[in-house]
Amino acid sequence: MNIIKAVGIINFSPEQVCGFIMDSSYKWDDMLEESRVLYDLGEDILVMYERFKFPWPVSNRDFVYGLKVLRRDDGFFIVTKSIDVPGPEVRATVRGEIVLSGFMLKKMESGKTE
């Protein structure tokens, strides 16, 4: 299993960054073809669908995953994992798996986010 960690400073508050991450209308990647909420289960739990177009010879991919926001005094944890629920089936698209992914958004004294 590959594990990747990246740390950076963003010039927005954790609330703003969290809102951006959860906004399925924003196209954050050139390969992103579709992003939408399939189910809003309340209590900061969403079931999401995303579809990506890849250049030949790589097959297009889509993902159905659960997203949970955990609110903390110093920011947020956002956790995602693929789940097995009905989602769109698109021809010539391979269903990808998110084993476990997420963000830790930590509030800095400057109002920025780490």
Image (cartoon, helix red, strand yellow):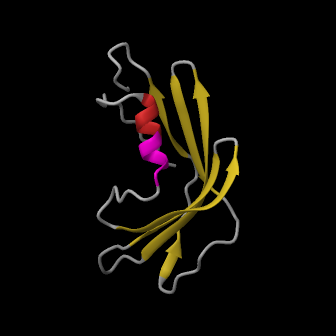
Position of residue 12 relative to residue 50, above or below, is above
57 left or right of 35 in image: left
65 left or right of 60 in image: right
105 left or right of 12 in image: right
Residue 72 screen position, x and y as percent: 58, 23
Residue 12 screen position, x and y as percent: 33, 30
Q: Does the magenta stretch include residue 113?
A: no
Q: Nearer the viewer, residue 67 or 100?
A: 67
Residue 100 screen position, x and y as percent: 57, 47
Position of residue 103 relative to residue 90, above or below, is above
Q: Where, by quadrant of the figure, is residue 64 drawn?
A: bottom right
Q: Where, by quadrant of the figure, is residue 14 drawn?
A: top left
Q: Identify the residue shown where x is 37% and y is 26%.
A: 113
Q: In which quarter of the image is the C terminus?
A: top left
Q: Identify the residue shown where x is 56% and y is 18%.
A: 73
Look at the image and give the residue range highlighted in magenta: 19-23
Position of residue 36 relative to residue 53, above or below, is above
Q: Main secondary structure of the magenta part?
A: helix
Q: Identify the residue shown where x is 41% and y is 37%.
A: 17
